[in-house]
Amino acid sequence: MAGSTSKTVHEIFHSMEYGPASASSTATAQAWLDHHSRSLGLFIDGKFVRPADRLICSLTDSKGGVVCSTVSAEDGDVSQCASSADGGYKTWSSLTCTQRSNILLRLVSVLGLHGQCVSELCELCEASCSLSSLIRLLQFYSSWAQLRDHLISNWSPVGVVVVVSSDDCSLYSLMLKVLPALAMGNSVVVVPGRSAAPPALLLAHLFTTAGLPAGALNVLTGSDVTLGAKVAQNSNVSYVTYSGNKQDGSVLCKATAGVGVPVSVSSCIGATCPFIVFESADINSAVDEVIQAAFKKKSELRWLLCVQESVAESVVTRLKLRMAGMKCVALRGDADRILVDAAVQEAKQQGATLVQSCVPPPSGAQYPPTVLCGAAPSSPFVVSPPPGPLLPVMTFRSNSEAVVLGNHSPHGHAASIWTEDLTLALETAKSLLVGSVWVNSSSVFDPCLPVSGHKDSSSCTDGGQEGLYQFLRPSFSSSPCSHSSPVSMDYSKFGTEASQAVIPDSSDLASPPPSYLHFVGGKACKSVSGSSVAVQAPGGGSVLAFCPEGGRKDVRNAVEAAIKVQPGWMKRSPCARAQSLYTLAKGLEAKRAEAVTSVSAQTGVSLAEAEEEVELSVARLRVWATYCDKVQGESLPMPQSGTALSVPEALGVIGIVLPDKSPLLSMVTLLGAAVAFGNAVVIVPSRKHPLPALTFVQVLQSSELPAGLVNIITGRPDQLTVAIANHSVIKAVWYWGSTEGCQYLQYTCTSPLKTLWLHRHKDEDGTDWTQSHPSLLEDTWRKAVQWKSVWIPTA
């Protein structure tokens, strides 16, 4: 046992138990806790603060003993902290890049002096994070702090960043957001979960002793993640980012809906990850690694073993041999034991075969390593395994079937592939809908690798250069964000107001206005409802045209058309996509006269101004055509032996609700960015100015874009926004609209998780679509891609 001195080194080697810990390493953390009377306060403005009359939360270890207690911050503490963070931001951001880099590098020396205390405190609180990984994070982001103005020009820090984590989130996942935010010049308010709270408080104190200005890093502790929502409501806060389990992330998004602050989510806890073993793999190494990953490592991930049929029996036999004699694994509590027992009983009822290292104890928060053979892909314990040492096993025959099994989970965090065939490994890695792929390895984490969970795992990118941009604001933007108070609204009734659509009756008109149609699946079609609405000239003038009034079924049909064509479009070469966009630009130029007339008549601008907008639209399409083969991945330098690849991928289907301003130019800017990088789009034109988008349909019909790649539906924005938000296939929503619409999307788009890019009408003047500013274009294309990292080790 740890701390024992009665065994020799030879005995410890054969028993594989922990050796005796030195008294100094054990006492360091205990002494720090004793110095604070084992009751930790808040860290605000560079010092510890312990306000009176606050709710106390106790932190216990795996054996039930109390490690320490923390206080729950209240409204007064939040205001004080936000004010301190605002002052800290002004001081920290005013430093030069070199000065900020030197301070972060100085932290490496400080951690070297106090490393034992940090490591011991992480172990006591079960907030897994090794000292070496913390040092690696500091070294990596200190260099990016130095290079910010050289390699990330035209961007500036967002301001005060709030970093929130759930109770079960590791310290590493927390610091993976804190350090890049600091490196880019932001101040940070950390709202950690219970397990990471004591180490976060200690690190904040150490950061201050290293020279970090007071207020640049503050720590608020509380009873749950809703404290993060309270901090977000302060007018000094510019951005909120979350790391942890999906449930708490959903609570945070709903609680911050309507405050006008962007919120990103990384659901890194409890994600189901496929562990795929092909017949060409080194079976012994694969079995050894899966046992380490599933049963021995304290990991935030849960594994699903997928084995090729030809080697399935061999893999199971080796699993039995490796598991023999393994001890029970400690669970977090009795509640987890109930979930594990229920999953095992369900597996037995479905005919699964159990392989266990020993007999489960009748009760208690422990359970033996268990392999569930013959699991069905649709079983709940396969799709979302409970927390505990359970490893479902499924078999596949072909490579394509392995990809289907790997993509069956709603999570898209990571995957491990085992094969000696590099071509097979890369093809499988490309087809899996996950953010990280490890070849012949698992759980390789390094800050240079971008972590961009796909599907329901993330709405942002952490790590690497790509992860820095969530903490930066493009310089074309006039202000970081505009706060507002949440609107009192019934989310179930949003977008359900009675339609004011009319059936066009132009029999009394000498020259009846034209009636437009939707553009779905590559052809013009009527609305499912069959109704239309009159579009009037500016100032309530004459009727210019009749537009169809779309609804939920129209959006459904558009998404079905988009999802059929998007995978094939994404697989096209960048040169082929570029050629299609060049053809689209050429088609718009051929329809210049019609486009100019439409823009002028709809918006009321002069023909010269309309001509300029059309000219800029043609140029913008050509710009996106040139981007197609310019944004590519790269090979990343890793401290370990091997090769790491960072690859941009399409999001999938994007729903776009267009702004009123510059209706044609804004549409081609957003449409071009989306399709250039392999996405399909469902576009809702401006309710006020729909005709330029509908005129553009003629250009789309004569273009080389696949039918269904671009779909245009007119109608009431609120009703169509509801349909887009509730469609499970749509991955991202780009929205220009009402304050209520923004709030509805933030509240609703949590399950499944969608990437949101929200703009309120009253803030729209901040975007000048006529400017070809580098940061405007870069910000737009970065919203259209997600990143995948592939780690390939070498001997």
Image (cartoon, grey):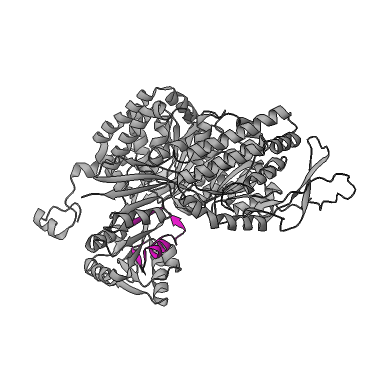
Residue at image point 45% right, 47% down:
573
Which residue is painted at 71% across and 38% down in the image?
A: 594
State the quadrant of the N terminus.
bottom left
Question: Could you tell me if residue 586 is visible in this image?
Answer: yes
Asked if the magenta segment contains residue 396, the reply would be yes
x, y percentage for residue 408? 45, 62
In-front residue for pair 601/581: 581
Q: Is residue 77 visible?
A: no
Instruction: Please provide percent x and percent y for residue 468.
Output: 42, 36
Q: Magenta segment: does it hold 199?
A: no
Residue 462 lies in what quarter of the image? top left
| Residue located farthest toward the right when viewing the structure as drawn | 508
Residue 52: x %, y % from top left: 47, 38
Q: Residue at x 39, y 71 (%)?
A: 375
**Magenta stretch in the rendered image:** 388-416
Q: Position of residue 616 (x, y in %)?
A: 61, 32
